[in-house]
Image (cartoon, grey):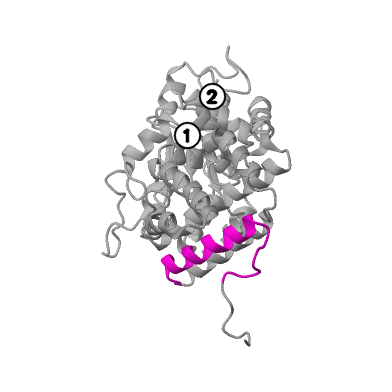
Amino acid sequence: MPWSRVVGQERSTDVLARALSSGRVAGTYLFHGPAGTGPRAAALAFAQALQCERRGRGGPDDDACGVCLACTKTARLIHPDVHVYLPFPRTSTRAGQDERPKDYAERLARLALDPYAPVDYRQRATLDAEGAQNKQVQHRKVPVDQFLRHDMTFVPAEGRHVVGVLTDADHLRTEAANSLLKLLEEPAPDVVLILTAERVENVLPTILSRCQRVRFDPLPAAAIEGALVARDVAADRAAFVARMADGSLTRALELVGSEALHAHRALALDFLRTAYTGRPDLLAPVVSKAAGLGRETLKSWFDLVTLWVRDLVLQSAGAEGRLVNVDQAEAVGKFVAHLPDADLPAMTALVAQAADAVAANGNATLVLTALSYGLRDAMLGRPAERLFTPLDVAA
């Protein structure tokens, strides 16, 4: 059944299932919660249930049957009465021209295959390469008028409803939001509009007042791990990625496909190990490699170092079950065994200071070198309060 495609959000899907079984379906919904936790997946499942030909007619009352023609068309996002609207970067500087990018249809096709797929333009500039979009990605007035408002004025062609799913409603430009508001003020019969948003406070209050809101919470790591294994991800990799995903299955899918992540994680552990030796000849190539990641990547790399230190804290406290690097539990255990006097909270603070220094345009090689010696002192139980002496402190 389509609700089964929504991972770990039973409270939210129960609300929607009750609306279907009672026949009290609102005209406009706002599904809100952290990105990748289920609002988009639930919106697509709800759209399928709304169109299901057998719902309440020999099929389930509160879910789609998943096998009728309407269900199969909606699942493939080719139903003429189901429309999905993603925000995208501007494709033309000419007034009145704002067409969808050439890969828009391909992104929808991938979304149909997996409603948690990382297809958003904000997170992925191109579908087959890592890297965020460097252009502004928003819902603008011309596309909202040309596509959404146009589609939502028709009567159903073959389904029970006309259903629109507008993702990232918290990225509506003001003029686009006002245009959408006009549609909500004069809703057409048999139209159901589902908005999704991560930050409710960025949605126009007059739009919020016209929506029935359904909240989605961050997913437990176990739920993400299970969803990854169901997608044929190796169990040890799924366990590690699930703990790094911060409650988002979409983020987890991005991380699973990132070879750079695993190389950077190994480099972070190598950095800690060589820092412990205090040997410049071993440390220099590791520092050089880390500094070569580039400033933006290095900021994220410090998070991986922090995660290793966090795992050392958890291991020393006997909380092995909460490790992020769960596939490296043996390595973490051996590391802790060799650090009986380590000041682990101080190590975390030093990494944070190094990240701040790089963010403030500090020389990466110098910062990493200073961090390595600071971490060594902390591992030996004699941590310094700061990596660097502030310029305004008298000698």
Image position of 75 with respect to 127: above or below: above
Marks 2 and 1, the one that precedes in the sequence:
2
Q: Does the magenta run of residues contain 310?
A: no
Residue 172 position, x and y percent, is 48, 57
Q: Secondary structure at mark 2?
A: helix
- Left or right: 120 in relation to 10: left
Image position of 345 with respect to 338: above or below: below
In this view, the residue in front, 329 or 377, is 377
User: Image point 64% across, 33% down: which residue?
Assistant: 9
Residue behind mark 1? 115
Residue 289 position, x and y percent, is 37, 55
Q: Which residues are magenta?
A: 361-387
Image position of 319 with respect to 73: above or below: below
- Left or right: 375 in relation to 280: right
Q: CA distance from mark 2 to mark 1?
A: 11 Å
Residue behind mark 2? 2
Answer few, some or many: residues within 10 Å of disc 2's Cα (few below 14, many 20 plus, some between 14 and 19).
some
In this view, the residue in front, 331 or 164, is 331
Q: Secondary structure at mark 1?
A: loop
What type is the residue that disc 2 sits on?
A: Pro
What type is the residue that disc 1 sits on?
A: Pro
Which of pointers 2 and 1 indicates the residue nearer the eye? 1
Query: Dividing the picture into quarters, in which one does residue 26 lie?
Result: top right
User: Image point 68% across, 56% down: which residue?
Assistant: 343
Image position of 132 with respect to 104: above or below: below
Residue 217 appears anywhere in the view: no
